[in-house]
Amino acid sequence: MYKKIVLFGFTCLLTLSSVFAQQKFGEKISTRKAISYDELLVKMEKMDSKSAPIEVKVKGDVLSVCQQKGCWMKLVSKADASKPQLFVKFKDYAFFMPKNLAGGKVVIKGKAYIEETSVDELKHYAEDDGKSAEEIAKITKPRKEYKFMADGVVILDK
């Protein structure tokens, strides 16, 4: 009986610590009712650069974070690596992500949209991401990208 009580107490403690360990940035948001990154991609596939942004809350996996300041991150589909990445910036440059967040899970709330990114901007982001000079030199054309302006972020785990 004593072992069961100790085990139950330990389980409760772990659960509470994981709840309180969530880090929140920007606007306070709930993690409830967030759609998956793959669900967002289905909605965005119907858009173009002239479409109005979609207001949405999304749960996703972090591929990378700006290694200079943490001022952007990229989300990916863990289910299908060939799907487009989502380039996430933070509203009013008001908050940044931890640089060691790659591989973690987040919930983000804000606006999803499609935009063409210039060569200069792509090169800048590649530098921020620690890409080599050879990789950066290969960037010669603007690229249509799936983007997101986040009002708030909750880190679920790192």
Image (cartoon, rainbow, N blue to C red):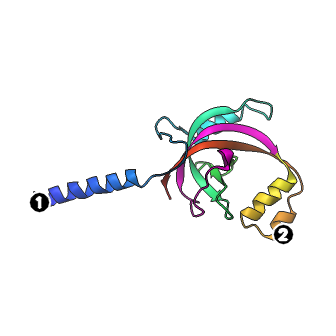
Residue plotted at (87% across, 65% down): 137
- Magenta region: 89-116
Q: In this view, does 20 lie to the left or right of 81?
A: left
Q: Distance between the residues labelled 2 and 1?
A: 63 Å
Residue 148 at what x, y percent from top left?
67, 42
From the viewer's side, name the closer residue of 44 and 108.
Answer: 108
From the viewer's side, name the closer residue of 18 and 152.
Answer: 152
Q: Name the residue under label 1.
A: 2
Residue 108 at what x, y percent from top left?
57, 43
Residue 117 at what x, y percent from top left?
82, 47
- Asked which secondary structure carries label 1, the reply is helix
Q: Is residue 96 magenta?
A: yes
Residue 122 visible from this viewpoint: yes
Which kind of residue does numbered mark 2 sit on? Glu
- Asked which secondary structure carries label 2, the reply is helix
Q: Is residue 130 magenta?
A: no
